[in-house]
Image: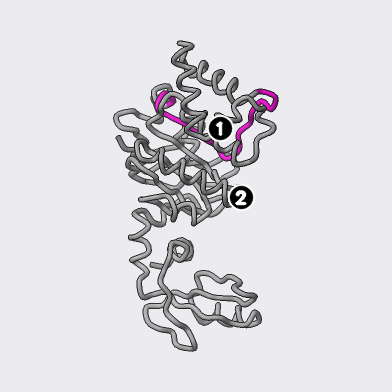
Amino acid sequence: MQLDISNLSKTYANGVRALDGVSLTIPRGMFGLLGPNGAGKSTLMRIVATLLEADGGAVTLGDVDVLREKDKVRRLLGYLPQDFGVYPKISALDMLDHLALLKGIVNSRERKAMVDSLLHRCNLYDVRKKSLASYSGGMRQRFGIAQALLGSPQLLIVDEPTAGLDPGERNRFYNLLSEIGENVIVILSTHIVEDVMELCTSMAVINQGRVLFAGSPEDGVNALSGRIWQRFIAKAEIKDYEAQYRIISHKMFAGRPLIHVYCENCPGDGFSPVTADLEDVFFSRLAGLN
């Protein structure tokens, strides 16, 4: 099974064109949807999750028409939105049991077995009877994944899942998503390059509602081979270098600005070659290069 998105468009009432002819083929496994805030990622995810109507285009999940057969899609879907609410005084165990019942799992033994399995899988079994209000940010995200996996979905959508997590919780979340992605389609929507670099075998870069790149992270990096150069500069020189070179990124390193520029040949002037990474792919595509 794969998810096919063809020429999808969406314009909001205020005139903002959130999606402008988006076309993607998303196979089973981890797929990274990378873009800055406001790029159209959440709009795309909400349409695929049947929460928002598209203006035009087509979306199919296997042989299911996502835009027209919403009930069928929802039986195949797990969704972890960027922000989700919980009843704070209810335990994770009771909340998952309730949600499983709402998903149509009426047999109590079957429901208990599924809930216990998900609590173990998401490393929440030992705290299953604690109120959700007492959970840390990472524990809440793992609970979010547990509820999204109720009913064994074939498509899992995860929107900005690691924002605000500490490094330890983030790594635990990475491991859980990697395990899930072995068997289902997992769409990871994020603006964090490291999320995609660590997890995804295929990806797309989206900005202003348009797909700027689609392929494997390796393909994106290889396309920049021999074209990324770096050097340290003084803070006061940034504008001068921006006027002379195609700077795709600059960041502080040991208190000094380090710039990456895109150039077919060595620009000289103290620049040295650097092996391209996914961050270079992201920023070069946003800049309209390559």
Q: Evaluate whether residue 266 shows in this view.
A: yes
What is the three-letter code of the residue carrying label 1?
Leu
Residue at mark 2:
166
The answer to whether residue 249 is above or below residue 65 is below
Q: How is the image coloured?
A: one colour
Magenta stretch in the rendered image: 74-90
What is the three-letter code of the residue carrying label 2?
Asp
Of labels 1 and 2, the one closer to you: 1
Q: Residue extending furthest top?
A: 107
Check residue 77 for magenta coloring.
yes
Residue at mark 1:
124
Q: Please tell me how crowded label 2 is: few (under 14), some (14-19), or many (20+) other residues with Cα within 10 Å.
A: few
Q: How many marks?
A: 2
Q: Which image quarter: residue 212?
A: bottom left
Q: Residue extending furthest bottom?
A: 269
- Rounded to the nearest angstrom, the CA distance separating label 1 from label 2 is 17 Å
Relative to 172, 70 lies left or right: left
The answer to whether residue 29 is above or below residue 104 is below
Relative to 20, 92 lies left or right: right
Residue 17, image x, y percentages: 52, 47
The answer to whether residue 250 is above or below residue 71 is below
Relative to 219, 141 lies left or right: right
Question: Looking at the image, which residue is at 43% across and 65% down?
Answer: 277
Residue 157, image x, y percentages: 46, 37
Question: Looking at the image, which residue is at 34% across and 54% down?
Answer: 215
Check residue 176 for magenta coloring.
no
Secondary structure state at the residue bearing disc 1: loop
The answer to whether residue 13 is above or below residue 231 is above
Q: Nearer the viewer, residue 120 or 285?
A: 120
